[in-house]
Amino acid sequence: MNLVNLIPGIIKGVSGYIRGRQELATAKSERKDELKKLALTNKLAVISSATEADMKLDNQANQRIAWADDVSFAVFLLPALLAFYPPALEHIQAGFTALDSMPPWYQYALGMMLISVWGYRRLVTPIILTITKAYINRK
């Protein structure tokens, strides 16, 4: 066997090995891209289904207690209307002072109840989570 005759075979084997490694690296990169795309698609599906679920909950709540948003709106608007009636001002201010002296957890619970009644759950959920985390971290 002549060494010169072996060189083309060795070069062919080495180039095949390098080509195989490149193909493997390309396949790995494509697979990573596919996995990222699938993860993003799954996240979007979860967000979409959560939004649909929130809308269903809001619709169910509206059907169940439709009167609650009317009553809460009237109660919420009443101090603004009575502010134009001078004998009521002292009572309005006393009421807000009393609400201000309530524990923070009660004030947050009251706010979350109004959010739930008015159906702004999806819009305000991040705010509620932030407030809850801040309140928990203070303790």
Image (cartoon, rainbow, N blue to C red):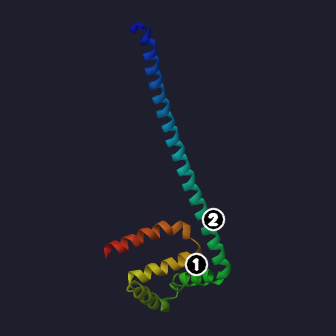
Rendered view: 137 above or below 29: below
Viewer-closest of 87 and 38? 38
Crowd class of label 1 (few under 14; some 14 to 19; many from 20; radius 10 Å): many
Q: Which residue is mark 1?
A: 117
Q: Which residue is mark 2?
A: 52
Rendered view: 134 above or below 10: below
Q: Quadrant of residue 77?
A: bottom right
What x and y, as percent, mark residue 67?
65, 84
Which quarter of the rendered picture does the C terminus lie within?
Answer: bottom left
Rendered view: 62 above or below 123: below
Nearer to us of marks 1 and 2 is 2
Q: CA distance from mark 1 to mark 2?
A: 17 Å
Badge 2 amino acid: Glu
What x and y, as percent, mark residue 80?
52, 81
Crowd class of label 2 (few under 14; some 14 to 19; many from 20; radius 10 Å): few
Residue pictured at 44% horizontal, 69% vertical: 129
Q: Earlier in the sequence, mark 1 or mark 2?
A: 2
Q: Secondary structure at mark 2?
A: helix
Q: Is 90 placed left or right of 82 in the picture?
A: left
Badge 1 amino acid: Val
Rendered view: 87 above or below 57: below
What x and y, as percent, mark residue 133?
39, 70
Which quarter of the rendered picture does the N terminus lie within?
Answer: top left
For the image shown, how many numbered marks are present on the structure?
2
| Outermost residue, left side | 139
Q: Is 12 placed left or right of 64 in the picture?
A: left
